Amino acid sequence: MNFIYKYFFILALVALSLPVYGQYLTLDSHIDIPFDYMDNPKHDPGNSTEMQVDFSKMKEGGLDSGFFIVYVGQSNLTDDGFKKAKDQAMLKFKAIHKMIQTYPDKILLALEPNDIRNAKEKGKISAAIGIENGYIIGNNINLLEDFYNLGARYITLAHIGHNQISDSSIPKKSLNDASEIHGGLSSFGKEVISKMNQLGIMVDISHISDKAALQAIKLSQTPVIASHSSARAIANHPRNLSDNIIKKIANKNGVIQVVAFSSYIEVNKERNNAINSLRKFIVDLTGDKIFIYRKHTEHPQYKIKMDEINRDFPLPSVDKFVDHVDYIVNLVGINYVGISSDFGGGGGIDGWMDASQTKNITLALLERGYSKNDIKKIWSENFLRVWTDVINHSKKKF
């Protein structure tokens, strides 16, 4: 009987929520793209694709806006490494701008929060730009302004592997990383944060070590973001945030964007071991030296065996995702939490496997008892508040 009551309760929620889905401005703060984005028809969001995010999926799921990410993996801290990273980054900047120029009737570039709001009013989706891995600036701090002029509005200071700016939460084995090399931020990294504050670029502490995160929060003159991280108290993973860091972000008026990445929502050692074995199998099969996510995840054998893993070790659910939202709200309040998918970079959970299922997040929040105003804050207003604060700070005279 309880099941029947719950079934009809959910149906009622769906019926009541359908008319108001469009009233929420939905913002996903982290969407990855491949290097051949817009050049390969399979990776053109204007087409019907197998990507987790394309225009039709965004429209179907009611996803209004996203930060499309200029990501480059960590490599050697050398002049050659920095040059290659910058060149790779430029490919993605060009791809995002090509998307905007090719489909002006569907998507607009967002350089400030009002651009996102205006796009929604016009019935269009919008794309902002974030950088994942400050490695791409090398030792040239002036590149920050160049990337800002190309549209970058946040920078994740590091990724997997330490860089010239910050220690990472996960040292990179293939680079023989020590546990840390800077003791948090480097002296150059501190200069980078100061310059980001001046330009109006949000400081993103996802991926960096706990020491680096605490130093960045303290040093930044503006609120900081965690663009795609969850709560370590629920899922004990180094990529997630400790209660102390969550509180420090909130005290600085920042925001934590809970991420739909399965390993950060629920730690499942058996599933992780199965995925690691699959990755080794694909590397051996292709003859490559390391696992290359955006290449190897499209291999037919990877897809077949990943389906088997998902069957044997199911993905965490949307409910478990919302557990992280609940936890952060209970810890620091409703004003400091948001939502990200990490689609295209490993994100995806049961019920939110691509942008077409975005409404399931809203439904789950309604089912938990969040009000309309609460959901507006979670979906975008909290993040846009931080972005506005960062812009306003940049307008001061230095």
Image: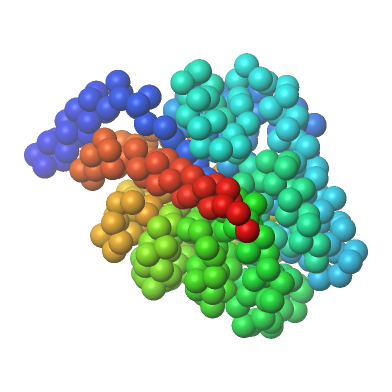
Left or right relative to 371: residue 81: right
Residue at 71%, 35% (x, y): give it: 96
- Residue 152 is situated, as x and y percent measured from the top left of the image, at 66, 46
Residue pushed farthest front?
397
Question: Relative to 32, does residue 244 appear above or below in the rendering?
Answer: below
In this rendering, does residue 197 appear at all? yes
Question: Relative to 130, does residue 52 appear above or below in the rendering?
Answer: above
Left or right relative to 341: residue 153: right
The quarter of the rendered structure image containing the N terminus is top left
- Residue 383 is situated, as x and y percent measured from the top left of the image, at 45, 46
Q: Nearer the viewer, residue 138 or 168?
A: 138
Q: Which quadrant of the view contains residue 188?
A: bottom right
In this rendering, does residue 61 appear at all? no
Left or right relative to 266: residue 47: right
Q: Which quadrant of the view contains residue 350?
A: top left
Residue at 37%, 54% (x, y): give it: 336
Q: How many marks?
A: 0
Residue pushed farthest right?
80
Residue at 74%, 51% (x, y): give it: 145
- Residue 5 is situated, as x and y percent measured from the top left of the image, at 12, 36
Q: Nearer the viewer, residue 91 or 8?
A: 91
Question: Relative to 78, does residue 375 appear above or below in the rendering?
Answer: above
Residue pushed farthest left?
1
Q: Nearer the viewer, residue 69 or 214?
A: 214
Q: Indicate the colouring scheme.
A: rainbow
- Residue 4 is situated, as x and y percent measured from the top left of the image, at 14, 35
Question: Relative to 282, does residue 95 appear above or below in the rendering?
Answer: above
The quarter of the rendered structure image containing the C terminus is bottom right
